[in-house]
Image: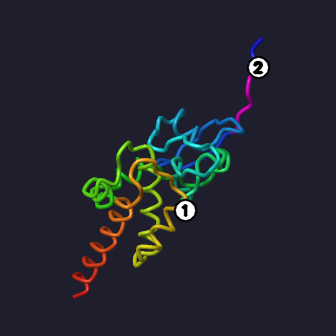
């Protein structure tokens, strides 16, 4: 005997592409993105919303994909690390992570980049301690955070200098 799982239909825009999908009512957003859409940039870590590896943007705000159900994305916009990378909006941040050796195993990198991108967007003049506080919800077991903070601060400084040059 086969037990069928009921599904719900959702309409969602993911990385700029609007479509309808059938999802299980209790399927987490990150599981849906990874298994159904093969968007594997967001990772499954703790599955309790603590580590930040599953971070995605939902209607422009970063959320933990392991705490949001796919059905909650109905009628909304989801951006994954793949979408932000393709848009080129974080190229300088990615380059700074490489330049400062702010990534090693890469497991936390997508969540760190998502958090850093939101910080730079919302608080472009953040001080070093504010950067540390902002990314505190994203765990990294490899780098010790110093290089990550350096990379983020480097990008904020570069963008401020570029903005000053444009205003002159």
Q: Which mark is residue 36?
A: none
State the scheme by which the image is colored: rainbow
Say above or below: 111 vs 38: below
Which span is picked out in magenta?
4-8
Quarter holding the N terminus? top right
What is the x, y in percent for residue 27?
66, 38
At label 1, counting other C-alpha atoms closer than 10 Å, the crowd grade (few under 14, some 14-19, many 20 or more) is: some
Where does label 2 land, which residue? Answer: 3
Front residue of 74 and 99: 99
Say above or below: 12 vs 59: above
Return the residue found at the far bottom: 168
As helix, strand or loop, the secondary structure at mark 2 comes to loop
Where does label 1 land, which residue? Answer: 61
Answer with left or right where residue 99 lies relative to residue 103: left
Q: Residue at x 65, y 36 (%)?
A: 23
Residue 5 in magenta?
yes
Return the residue found at the far front: 144
């Amino acid at each position: 005997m086969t037990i069928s799982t009921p599904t719900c239909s959702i309409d969602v825009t993911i990385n700029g592409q609007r479509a309808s999908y059938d999802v299980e009512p209790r399927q987490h957003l990150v599981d849906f993105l990874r298994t159904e859409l093969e968007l594997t940039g967001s990772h499954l870590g703790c599955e309790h919303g603590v580590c930040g590896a599953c971070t995605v943007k939902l209607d422009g705000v970063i959320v933990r994909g392991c705490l949001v159900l796919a059905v909650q994305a109905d009628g909304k916009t989801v951006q994954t690390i793949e979408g932000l990378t393709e848009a080129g909006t974080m190229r300088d941040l990615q380059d700074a992570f490489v330049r400062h050796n702010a990534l090693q195993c890469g497991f936390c990198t997508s969540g760190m980049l998502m958090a850093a991108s939101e910080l730079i967007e919302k608080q472009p003049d953040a001080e070093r301690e504010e950067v540390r506080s902002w990314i505190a919800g994203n765990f990294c077991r490899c780098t010790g955070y110093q290089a990550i903070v350096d990379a983020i601060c480097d990008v904020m400084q570069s963008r401020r200098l570029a903005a000053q040059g444009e205003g002159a």
